[in-house]
Image (cartoon, rainbow, N blue to C red):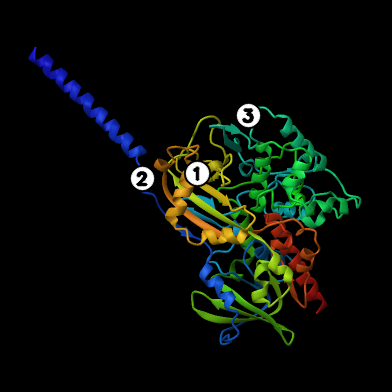
Amino acid sequence: MSEDRFSRKVFLSALAFCAALLGIGSYFRFRKRKIQGSILGPDKETGHRLRQVRTNFSTTNTIQTKVLIAGGGISGLSSGYYLSQFGISDYLILDLEKDVGGNSRYSETNSLKYPWGAHYLPQPGPESVLVRKFLEENGLVQGKDSSGNPIYPEKYLCFDPEERLFYQGRWQAGLVPRRNGEPDAQELLFRKIINSWQNKRGRDGQKAFCIPIDRSSRDPEILKLDRITFSEYLKSLGIQSQEILWYADYCTRDDYGGNSDNISAWAGLHYFCSRLREDEDSPPVLTWPEGNGFLLELLQKPSKDKIRTSTLVERIRKNSGTWEINAYDVKEKKDLLIKAEQVIFALPSFIRKYILGEKDAFLQKLEYSPWLVANLFVDELPQGKGHPPAWENVIYKSKSLGYVVSTHQDLRALRPQSVLTYYLAFGEKDTLASRRSILPKTWDDWKEEILSDLKKPHQNIESLVSRIDIMTHAHAMIRPIPGFLWGGEREKLAKSESGIHFAHCDLSGISIFEEALYRGFEASKKVQMSSKRS
């Protein structure tokens, strides 16, 4: 009898102990954990030296080169890539940041790669000859299909599920909000509008919307779409649904960093109609864990020993037939003088007034969208009700663009850890006010905002996150406001003058990899032609 009681007592104690352990486990799993992190990003302090407009430069440290490329973003690296192809090897690329790549930069931590900006490349259409050739010459094309389109390796095509949207309390497949799971009349009308433009050609025989943008039709009837906003255009054709207007807004923020009520209708339609489509759907995008950092590595290969980072270009002037570039070495804290026969200016156009001394009033009107990118290190992927985790995960009516799962393409899918790349585009009309709102915010402020947003679909997100690193971009991308793309001024900015050629993708009016590649190619081609004449 006493032995039975003892056994029962031990058994009940053991049960209580196990329950306590479970409780402790739950506590540690769901308690508010200490999250680490930091704010990274562009060297704003050094960059703002440009506003001083210095004139007293030391000329002690002089470098001679045939071609100086100012800027190591994709357009600058593209310039170097194609100069090498044209047989010009004497060039130098200068960039302020510690790493080149601009909006295509990436990082790697504990064998996890993740982007700090651009994270995919849509399959290029037939007009994008240069991009197709670039992919092919770098071994990313396996052959051609029956329509003549390139066939890409499966591992580089975004795996299913590609997209999901948190809407009405649960995740649904795709990004168009659907109340009953099926397209409603407004969605069908929106599709009809887009389809009517998809293969339309202007009176000049050119396709209405192309990549590169300069291949697009110049038909005045099409170009007048640049004078009104995308939301105005859609509303004029009967789009009233809050869901469809939100979707249009999401798309313009995704590509241009601006809401649809301050992006031109031409630019809005270009987003949908310039790219390759199969029936009514776009084929899977090309993507990698490091995003377009994968393409960045291919692009900078020929220039590896010709890149000088942590170097600020402060002034460019021509002196007796030679270009003189005054730069500042941030690490060594010393001035540099580079003498070159020709210059490729692959820096944003808004700083031309400081570096080149240009006084064109149009430069004051250029608008750039501010962005925030955060990388959240998680112990496992957040789930949620409804559709399973996808590559792109978007929250309806959020200020953010949601997050991308960096390990989505990871063939080693057994590991639960991942990095969520979270994007926030400040799409409001007043970009200056947006930039000012960013300046005083601390890492803690951003952490709370990001987690608050992600708690909508993932109540337990804090228990999964171990670290949040944040990067803000005050002038992340050019914004195609009404009148900018086809008002005539943009083309003037791209004109070469006395051996200086312009290559930044803001000359295209849209900030995408394809345009940056094209601008670098065009600038390097002009260098080659000038070299032959001299």
Q: Could you tell me residue 152's position as x and y percent?
A: 68, 44
The vertical placement of 422 against 395, above or below, is below
Q: Please tell me whether mark 2 sits on a helix, a strand or a loop.
A: loop
| Mark nearer the N terminus (1 vs 3) | 3
Q: Which amino acid does label 3 sit on?
A: Arg
Which residue in the protein does label 2 denote? 33
Judging depth in this view, the residue of 246 and 79 nearest the camera is 246
* Residue contact at pointers 3 and 2, CB within 8 angstroms: no
Crowd rating for badge 1 (residues with CA inside 10 Å; few <14, some 14–19, many 20+): some
* Residue contact at pointers 1 and 2, CB within 8 angstroms: no
Which residue in the protein does label 1 denote? 453
Q: Distance between the residues labelled 1 and 3?
A: 22 Å
The vertical placement of 366 against 272, above or below, is below
Q: What residue type is labelled 2?
A: Arg
Q: In which quarter of the image is residue 3?
A: top left
Number of numbered discs: 3
323 left or right, relative to 444:
right
Q: Could you tell me residue 399's position as x and y percent?
A: 57, 47
Which residue in the protein does label 3 denote? 179
Q: What residue type is labelled 1?
A: Asp
Judging depth in this view, the residue of 483 and 522 nearest the camera is 483
| Mark nearer the N terminus (3 vs 2) | 2
Question: Residue, x 71% and y 75% (percent of image)?
Answer: 359
